Image (tube, helix red, strand yellow):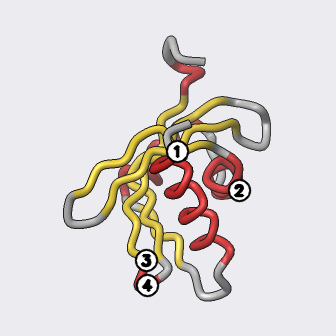
Amino acid sequence: MNNRFFREQIRVRGILGHRDHWLVWSFHARERMRQDKITEADVRHVLTNGQVTWLEVKVDEIIHVEGRDTSGRKMRIVTAVRDAAFTLKVLTVIPFWKGSRQ
C-alpha cells in the first residue's frame, strides 16, 4: 500500500475515533444508500476497516475508501475530509456487487 494512502487511512480512523467527530451525509449518498439498502453502520464499517485507494486535493481532501460492509458486500465510500472540525462528509457510496468490481 502507498505510504500516503496508509497515512490517510490512519487519519480517517482517527477522525472517526474522536469523541467530537461528525459524519455528514450528502443527499446523493443518502439516495444511493436507500436504493442499495446500505446502512450507516455499513458505511462506518467500511470507513473504519477499509483501505484508502485514492486521494485527491480540492477545497477539501477527497478520499476513496474501499472495503466490505457488515454483510461482506464490497463497496467504495467517497468522503471529503475536514480535519479542523473532525468531519467526514460522505459524498457517495458505490456498491461493487451491482457492477463488475466485486
Residue at mark 4? 85
User: Is there CB contact under 8 Å for labels 4 and 3?
Assistant: yes
Q: Is residue 96 left or right of residue 57?
A: right
Residue at mark 1? 52
The residue type indicated by label 4 comes to Ala
Residue at mark 2? 41
**Between 11 and 19, which is closer to the camera in this rendering?**
11
What is the distance, in whole Å, between disc 4 and disc 3 at their CAs?
5 Å
SS at badge 4: helix
SS at badge 1: strand
Q: Nearer the viewer, mark 3 or mark 2?
A: 3
What is the distance, in whole Å, between disc 2 and disc 1 at their CAs?
18 Å
Q: Nearer the viewer, mark 4 or mark 1?
A: 1
The residue type indicated by label 2 comes to Ala
The residue type indicated by label 1 comes to Val
Crowdedness near tag 1: few (<14), some (14–19) or many (≥20) residues, C-alpha within 10 Å: many
What is the distance, in whole Å, between disc 3 and disc 2 at their CAs?
22 Å
Q: Position of residue 76 (x, y in %)?
A: 52, 38
What is the distance, in whole Å, between disc 2 and disc 4 at their CAs?
21 Å
Which mark sits nearer the N-terminus, 3 or 1?
1
Crowdedness near tag 4: few (<14), some (14–19) or many (≥20) residues, C-alpha within 10 Å: few
The residue type indicated by label 3 comes to Asp
Q: Residue furthest front?
A: 3
What residue is at 71 percent from the left and 49 percent from the top? 49
What residue is at 55 percent from the left and 24 percent from the top? 96
